[in-house]
Image (cartoon, coloured by chain):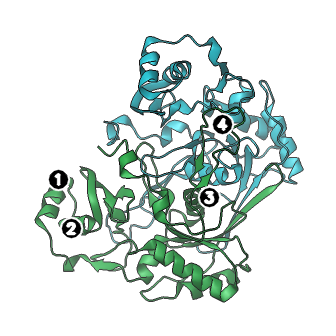
Chain colours: A cyan, B green
Amino acid sequence: MSSLAHLTLTALPQIPLIQPGDDLVAITLAGLKGAGLRLQNGDVLVYASKILSKAEGRQVALSQVQITPEARALAQRTGKDPRLVTLILEESAQVLRARPGLIIVEHRLGFVCANAGIDASNLGEEDGVLLLPRDPDASARRLRAGLQQATHADVAVIINDSHGRAWRLGTVGVAIGLAGLHPLTDRRGDRDLFGREMRVTVLGTADEIAAAASLLQGGTDEARPIIHMRGVPYRAGPGRLQDLLRPRELDLFRK
Amino acid sequence: MSSLAHLTLTALPQIPLIQPGDDLVAITLAGLKGAGLRLQNGDVLVYASKILSKAEGRQVALSQVQITPEARALAQRTGKDPRLVTLILEESAQVLRARPGLIIVEHRLGFVCANAGIDASNLGEEDGVLLLPRDPDASARRLRAGLQQATHADVAVIINDSHGRAWRLGTVGVAIGLAGLHPLTDRRGDRDLFGREMRVTVLGTADEIAAAASLLQGGTDEARPIIHMRGVPYRAGPGRLQDLLRPRELDLFRK
């Protein structure tokens, strides 16, 4: 562990504005070429969830939303658009907290986030909003398979999004979908020299990768949505988002 | 924002086991030399808090701890060593949650973490534990000033630690002290093209840097405690840990 270790991140250049139906594998391959990169085993590609949402046609026009009574009540309580709140509730398993301007939910995908991860900015049409990908693990698996078929390289793929935190300010990139890696790195036993309680035992590797990529993306914005990483210490294998989520029964802060 | 962007991280090689009183500036300069790196303006150095704690003599022998009645009660409830619990309470402003094996506190430095960040592993003597640095912002400022004096480069310094999260498994690196940068990057107004609610507005840059470095450190372990980063988009200036912490009155999850 004490030898020289390098990690490099490259934002793929000249990624076009993504449209529904776009082929993100082809776009990635063109971006890698533009950056002078050839995929190698062990590389990681991180995609801002927003471009998956766009490619997969997850735009919804607010004018088409049928407001529910539950959404109308919550919209009143939070001062948010009742059509947006209807979508937030549709995308959520449970509302954890609500206050003016903010609704914290357990998303249907299992993670806790604000406003069900719905992006109401920058869509280019007056009333359009963008939902998260329907199944980000499946999106990651498709990207990984496409890249592997084209390059024969065994890589990991992470879909990231920007989440707030309960006790800290500012958003950080987190993984909301993944393929080709175990998202946690279990260090238990590695350095238990004195048979005592270990402070750090399991590392949230996929989330640290997502955060590192987000630094270059500028907050999972669109300008630099695809990040290539080389030198990441991760364990290849069949991982999924669920592995990263704390089971409800171990949650000390839901109630 | 769409040009080629690179970020490189290097774990400085051959960092010795740190002892109380060690000169971390001299050790950093030797590590940079070993890595063939010459500091430049805008570089970032990330230090695992553990080596700051060691250099600053924050080891405490459990056999010297006078157990308090409050600690004895909490130790019984959590099944933890009452001497360790005494130190946890001394290092904390408030206990937020406790269950067998785990005490979540607001640390006296203001952040929320498990067991007050006290490291009870790997100290090399039977009953020794390691407290976090007394004032990590001050530690970061000293390192930054020392590096600047030696190299004339204007760099940012972050002290990182590994924290668990309320709803996700695995630890991630976070900043617990910093110097030379604004830890948050405010994007409000940057892309508000349609005059609508922005989803991502303020980025937790210092925490994303801390997480990226932690990938190479292997969980703020000791083997690779000092990470050099080049190409990080950050705003230089006088930042401090406090800027990263959500004020209590905006905390929806404390109670």
Give the numbered dot on residue A49.
4
Same chain, labels 3 and 2: no
The subunit letter for the residue under badge 1 reads: B
State how far apart marks 1 and 4 are (Cα). 43 Å
* Nearest-to-viewer mark from 3 and 2: 2
Which structural element holds mark 4?
helix
State how far apart marks 3 and 2 are (Cα). 37 Å
The subunit letter for the residue under badge 2 reads: B
> Does residue B161 show up?
no
Q: Identify the image quadrant of residue B191.
A: top right
Q: Residues within 10 Å of mark 3 (few under 14, many from 20)?
A: some
Q: Amino acid at mark 4?
A: Ser
Tell me, yes or no, whether the two marked residues, 3 and 4, touch with CB atoms within 8 Å.
no
Q: Amino acid at mark 2?
A: Thr
Same chain, labels 4 and 2: no
Q: Pointer 3: what residue?
A: A233
Q: Identify the image quadrant of residue A132.
A: top right
- Pinpoint residue A56: horizontal percent, then vertical percent: 71, 25
The subunit letter for the residue under badge 4 reads: A
Same chain, labels 1 and 2: yes
Q: Pointer 2: what residue?
A: B86
Give the numbered dot on residue B77.
1
Compared to residue A169, the image places residue A17 above or below, namely above
Instruction: Return the residue nearer the eye: A150 or B188.
Output: B188
Which structural element holds mark 1?
helix
Whichever of labels 3 and 4 marks the residue nearer the N terminus, that label is 4
* Nearest-to-viewer mark from 1 and 4: 4
Tell me, yes or no, whether the two marked residues, 3 and 2, touch with CB atoms within 8 Å.
no
The subunit letter for the residue under badge 3 reads: A
Tell me, yes or no, whether the two marked residues, 1 and 3, touch with CB atoms within 8 Å.
no
Q: Is residue B58 left or right of residue A23?
A: left
Q: Residues within 10 Å of mark 1 (few under 14, many from 20)?
A: some
